[in-house]
Image: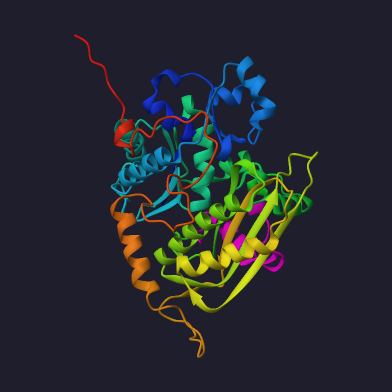
Amino acid sequence: MFALIDCNNFYASCERVFNPNLQGKPVAILSNNDGCVISMSDEAKKLQLPFGAPIFKWEQFCKANNIIVLSSNYPLYGDMSARVMSILSDFSPDIEVYSIDESFLELKGFENYNLTEYPTSMRSRVLKWTGIPTCVGIAPTKALTKVANKIARSNLKQSKGICIIDSDEKRIKALKWTKIGNVWGIGSRLKKRLQEKGCETAYDFTQLSSDWVLKNFSIVEWRLHKDLQGISKIPLGEVSSKKMIATTRSFEYTYTDIDNIKERISTFTASCAQKLRVQKSSCHMLIVQLSSDRYQKDLEQYSASKTVVFSYPTDSTLTISNAAIEAVKTIFKSGIKYKRAGVIVTGLVPNDNFQLNLFSSENPKHKPLMAAIDKLNSKFKSDKIKLGNQDLKRTWKMRQDRLSPKFTTNIHQIITVNATK
């Protein structure tokens, strides 16, 4: 059996833990640079505030409906997520952290456990120790736990946040309730193709021939098909190295000068290089992107990218940053108001197994230098050591006009409790 534990309205729930005045009130959380709505409480959903709504268009709607709008507080959410996942790891040694707010547990050897009491204990402990409400779905396969979790979340009063699919009768009933477009792993294109085949529910999908699914789709869809039939074909995911690493951000303001843009590109590059070293990889290729504000239709629009191929694989911030700055110089166009930039490193190879170049190689001083920088930054829990062309005060320059305090990650912003007799 598998269990899927999902935190309810995670970002909004994190804010409520440290600000109880938000309980029962509509809350919306914004994306980077206070752009669009990416999370909201159930109260905000009932007011039909759409996901992805640009806040500059919906500001008046939020004010009229008393929706409390907050900037994303990623340090807080990341820390709370780590606490939740740590608690869940006590319930099973086999855990897959699927996203910031959900995890799969494989329940091996739990045949003698009460599968009603166990998820209740999970929910109670997470709520008591962190203040975060959750829902739990339990089923024989990962795909079915997704279905079970949606059912648990759809009617909290009746389900009490728990749904267990432990019989074929319950499986069929759950699949008939689930629309084909709501099935885990089925996107809009696959949904359209399945609907053309007459599949309107997840149950309809399971009635297709396995041979036909494998012939007309990929092994991924075949595994999903089997999983929904109750035959486990999707194991817990293993941590694997990424094939590319990207850091793309919108600026807090539009920039017209190349100096600010070079500083941002350098910071993005440092982030990519550090991630390369974490997974013990080096890159052969660098892509630098630059674009104007596509929402400002009255301004001249411009978008460009530059690809740099290294003669040898590298994970050095110095080497990659220098190449990125030179790339920016070639694609920068004066007179444009730039709003977004990005750095992508690809062509990744493991540091302990790659082809050497006879005529060129990495400066041997870079490896120990990068190791020393990473060690210091890790020790002090922040990017204290930076390149000279980076902003020394901030990592990401984002507009966060509605940001709550970093209650758990900044000692100067720790919550204050006033006690009276």
Q: Is residue 124 visible?
A: no
**The one of 168 and 69 positioned closer to us in this rendering:** 69
Residue 407 at x, y percent in the picture = 35, 33
Residue 405 at x, y percent in the picture = 40, 31
**The one of 160 and 303 positioned closer to us in this rendering:** 303
The residue under the point 74% across, 48% down is 335
Q: Quadrant of residue 134?
A: top left
The residue under the point 48% across, 86% down is 356
Residue 15 at x, y percent in the picture = 43, 29
Query: Where, quadrant-wise, is the C terminus in this rendering?
Result: top left
Q: Is residue 62 visible?
A: yes
**Residue 222 lies within the magenta run:** yes
Most extreme residue toward the bottom is 358
Q: As displayed, is residue 78 above or below residue 271?
A: above
**Residue 20 lies within the magenta run:** no
The overriding secondary structure of the stretch rendered in magenta is helix
Most extreme residue toward the left is 421
**The one of 67 and 174 positioned closer to us in this rendering:** 67
Which range of residues does the magenta coloring cover?
205-233
Q: As displayed, is residue 199 above or below residue 318?
A: above
